[in-house]
Image (spheres, rainbow, N blue to C red):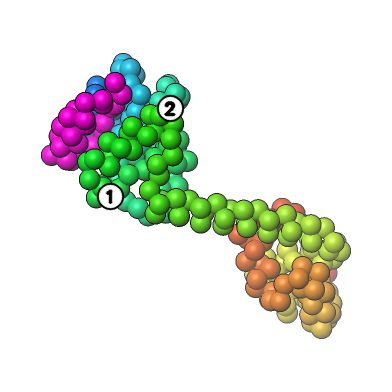
Amino acid sequence: MIRVIIAEDIYSLRNEIVRAIECSGFISVVGESSSGSGIVKIAEHTEFDVALLDVEMEKPNSGIEAAKYILKIKPAVKIVFLTFHDADEVIFSAFDAGAVDYVIKDSDFSKIIHHINQVYQNKEVIDWKIQKKIRKEFLRLRKSETNLIFFIRNLSVLTPAEKVILSLLVEDLSIRDIAAKRCVEITTIKTQISHILAKLHIKRTKDIVRQIKEMKLEDLLYSQQAEC
């Protein structure tokens, strides 16, 4: 018998889910609550295999917080999120919290039961829409990591003076202001920026600045900037 605890703040929906699960014949609901804090208390004193958690209850992320705590005290249990939300940030937060599955509330109850049974048996059953979002995020992160390594390597070929100029560009100084700060002609700064663009294989200055800020690489540039 699979033992399940459920947290869902919509009373009528929770009752329907509980009835459907109990009628399955192989799943037993051993605890239920309308809040994240309530399900945590139940988890502390109950033996169970799967936690079916709503994401948003008394707080927008109550289910996420509850999942993290439950896995801390009982790392062997499986977390399945049940929610109306299919926004990317909610899905990624759920899996980051340790979820093994994520079921949208428009799913019929037989599908919820199927998901509970599959995760209990350590089988993958994540909805294809969720898989697509996760795969897309993985590819984005892998691309970001590749870009980061590539960018850091290219930064290493810049001269000290070029790094200083780049750091001033990141501070959103104009070419005129940089020239004044460096005590050189504007044309000199323009030439140096052209060299920087060529070395980093980037066409526009604003693209360099954007990438450095997004990757938080400001510390790799020289912080000491000579003035007149």
Q: Is residue 19 magenta?
A: yes
**Reading the chain from its start, which is encountered first: label 1 or label 2?**
2
Q: Indicate the amino acid at tag 1.
A: Phe
Label 2 secondary element = helix
Identify the residue shown where x is 44% and y is 31%: 122
Tell me which segment is drawn in magenta. 1-27
**The quadrant where residue 17 appears:** top left
Q: Looking at the rendered structure, which numbered label has been put on residue 94?
A: none
Q: Residue furthest front?
A: 25
Q: Position of residue 154 (x, y in %)?
A: 79, 61
Q: What residue is shown with label 2?
A: 71
Disc 1 packing (10 Å; few <14; some 14–19; many ≥20): some
Is residue 109 found left or right of 89 in the rendered image?
Answer: left
Q: Is residue 142 above or below residue 165?
A: above
Disc 2 packing (10 Å; few <14; some 14–19; many ≥20): some
Q: What residue is shown with label 1?
A: 84
Is residue 220 found left or right of 111 in the rendered image?
Answer: right
Nearer-the-camera pick, 93 or 143: 143
Q: Position of residue 208 (x, y in %)?
A: 68, 68
Q: Mark 2 and mark 1 in contact (Cβ < 8 Å)?
A: no
Q: Residue furthest left?
A: 12
Q: Position of residue 116 (x, y in %)?
A: 32, 34
Which quadrant of the rendered structure holds the N terminus? top left
Q: Is residue 139 visible?
A: yes
Identify the residue shown where x is 26% and y is 25%: 26
Q: Indicate the amino acid at tag 2.
A: Leu
**The quadrant where residue 206 appears:** bottom right
Which quadrant of the rendered structure holds the C terminus? bottom right
Q: Position of residue 169 (x, y in %)?
A: 70, 69
Alpha-carbon span between mark 1 and mark 2: 23 Å
Label 1 secondary element = loop
Q: Is residue 227 visible?
A: no
